[in-house]
Image (tube, helix red, strand yellow):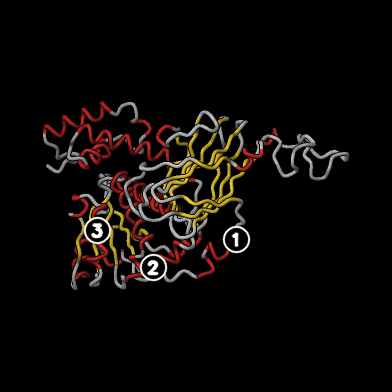
Amino acid sequence: MSGRVGDLSPKQTEVLEQFRERVQDILPLLPAQHDHFLLRWLRARNFHLQKSEAMLRKHLEFRKRIKVDEILTDWRPPEVIEKYLSGGMCGYDREGSPIWYDVIGPMDPKGLFLSASKQDFIKSKIQDCEALQRECNLQSQRLERNVEGITMIYDVEGLGLKHLWKPAIETYGEILQMFEENYPEGLKRLFVIKAPKLFPVAYNLIKHFLSENTRQKIHILGANWQEVLMKYIDPEELPIHHVGPVPPSYYVRDHVKVDYEQCMTVSRGSSQQVDQEILFPGCVLRWQFSTQSADIGFGVFLKGKRGEWKKASQMHEVVLSQRYNSHLVPEDGSLTCEQPGVYVLRFDNTYSIFQAKRISFTVEVLLPDHLKSPPQSPLQSPLQSPLQSPLQSPLQSPLQSPLQANGGVGSHERGEGDGQSA
């Protein structure tokens, strides 16, 4: 039995009923509630009830953490990604499934990663996955039958060593893992065409991110690739899609110069924490940082008291901790602090067993509108805030001590990493 609606064994039918009952509490929050959707999670875990439930609940947490709905409605990829990242939907196969066509050879991975952050690439792929799922739903309505998988075509002519650049391979691996964990059974089949001799090397670098079920859907075609494709796809549905090298004018590090206020070194296998006390709800915590030679992990946490050292696992995570290619593109971000407390900016190098990381960074706090200074009195010094006492430095916020203004730096952790080396 295929494990799809209309082709279920009695045991599979029973598991589906139990599965629906166990996820009743989160069902309204999911993108879909019908049996076709639930069966995708069951098939992905071979109808193991507990594993399927854990996978689905983890997916819901992913949607909340990454703010998928906001990515779909409010976020637009940087121009360089829209222009120079290959791939797009081009039509439908003979069974009505959407086709995604990707041309790898002309793509310029290094230029792209020097021009946009890794997080932007991941967000753009989330957009793509969600758009393809929406298109499957629309096709289901048009054809009055379920369409849930996409046909992918990877044209890898021209694949070279530039495509095996480490930051690009690592990010592609993260994207594949995200796809496996959050869009199960979304792939119908994948055709690889015009594969050069280097392709087996590239495939071996990323195939461990793919489930066995996904690997079985990959078809590496030979010289007769056109003949094979025509069995599944009308020729009129296939595009001519070209990208090229990214102009250096997009390279962020070459054009954005930041004067950072602080520098520090995070030793190999350890981390550093920067404490910033927030006294009022509604304050905006902002940060900028870059590294000299390699990536760094970064996240923001909340703890109870200033000066007390805690492991990341003992604090409340308010900004997801992840690795940033800040040696390629400087990172910046902000957080509106909903509650007072000590916010910890944690730079994580615990995954690196060989290399220390040198970080330049700036941290600042913006007050909410109702606490900002009123217009200056003529009697006040032009550099003195009306909330400042005469003893305060004109460049120091009246709501912070000098230590708070700069943040407390310290706290080394070891052995909390994800086990990946860098």
The residue closer to the viewer here, 76 or 240, is 76
Residue for point 24% across, 36% down: 52
Mark 3 vs 1, N-terminal side = 3
Residue holding disc 3: 190
Which residue is nearer to you in this view: 182 or 376? 376
Residue 263 image point, x, y percent: 55, 52
Dot in front, 3 or 1: 1
Left or right, residue 410 beside residue 188: right
Above or below, 161 against 166 in this view is: below
Quick one: SS at disc 2? loop
Disc 3 vs disc 1: Cβ atoms closer than 8 Å? no
Give SS at disc 1. loop
Q: Describe residue 183's horizontal placement relative to residue 270 as left or right.
A: left
The mark found on residue 257 in the picture is: 1
CB under 8 Å between discs 3 and 2: no
Residue matched to label 2: 107
Q: Nearer the viewer, residue 414 or 82?
A: 414
Quadrant of the image for the N terminus? top left
What is the spatial separation of the Cα atoms under label 3 and label 2, in whole angstroms?
19 Å
Residue 406 rendering spot, x and y as whole percentages = 61, 43
- Which element is circle 3 on? strand
x and y percent of residue 69 in the render?
Answer: 44, 42
Q: CA distance from mark 3 to mark 1?
A: 43 Å
* Amino acid on which the number 2 mark rests in the picture: Met
